Image (spheres, rainbow, N blue to C red):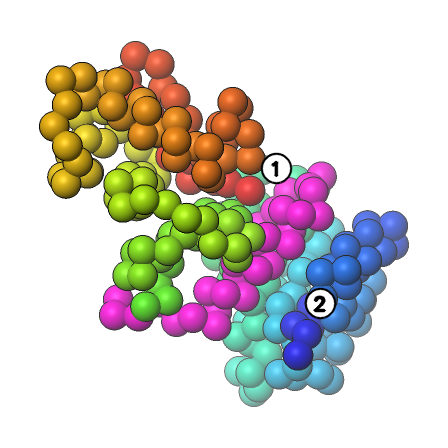
Amino acid sequence: MSKQILLIEDDPDLAELISDYLTMNYYDVHHAGLGQEGLDLLNTKERDIDLVVLDLMLPDMDGMQVCQKIRGNKNNMTNKVPIIMLTAKGDTTDRVLGLEMGADDYIAKPFEPRELLARIRAVIRRHEQPNQADSQSDSLTFGRLSVFPDSHEVTIDDLPVRLTTHQFQLLHYFATHSGKVLNREQLWQAMPNDDSSDNIDRAIDVHISRLRALIEDNPRQPKRIITVRGVGYQFATDQV
């Protein structure tokens, strides 16, 4: 059964673009051009809606108010529906405020439809798979990339990526230390079963080159594993 997406967006051209792209990817999209219209649609359908894509700037009320009304409705299950907020603003304050209001994710315009699709899939997956320490489905998700520690699986756009044991150990270490700059010695220690090497720096560089070939859209211009010259590598926290 197709997932039901409620799109609350007042720009008709953008709404049509998003609706067409999501429909092509087997989602059913319900569109509302006003905040109140979106709330009415959500309350009418109640549990049918799987996710709300919500624009921050709307003619009748802003997206923060819509988000607050959804989360504040304790009378039915709609207050649990996941929300991805859209905005033309890149201000960190808006992002933080949106997340504090109860949004599950945040994407700034302009964006590629593929990025929105990836975020929708990731947010829905997180809601369908409770985050429990003993759960096989527990994952570390960065945009379109997900790492599943218990099953030693990795997916991009929900498609499996085949990694060796060493590659998975290295990626898992990166994922659990995202945003931190890690030197080669730290990364080497993350692979305790690796063979001894007289040149640790070279060995790590080779491992990372091979890992990039598997997880980067363009390994020559990496966006996930970033080189920090003279220090080591950093795994990007914000990814698409």
In the picture, measured across the screen, residue 86 lies left or right of residue 145, that is right
Say above or below: 195 vs 69.
above
In the picture, measured across the screen, residue 174 lies left or right of residue 199, that is right
Q: Position of residue 54 (x, y in %)?
A: 68, 59
**Which amino acid lies under the numbered mark 1 shown in the image of this protein?**
Gly
Q: Position of residue 158 (x, y in %)?
A: 53, 57
Residue 15 in view: no
Res. 90 mark: 1
Say which residue appears at 57% left-offset and 72% top-offset. 81
**Which amino acid lies under the numbered mark 2 shown in the image of this protein?**
Tyr
Report the span colored magenta: 106-135
The front one of 118 and 188 is: 188
Say which residue appears at 12% left-offset and 28% top-offset. 196
Say above or below: 63 vs 5.
above
**On-image quarter of the C terminus:** top right
Q: Position of residue 215 (x, y in %)?
A: 46, 39
Q: Position of residue 71 (x, y in %)?
A: 55, 71
Res. 27 mark: 2
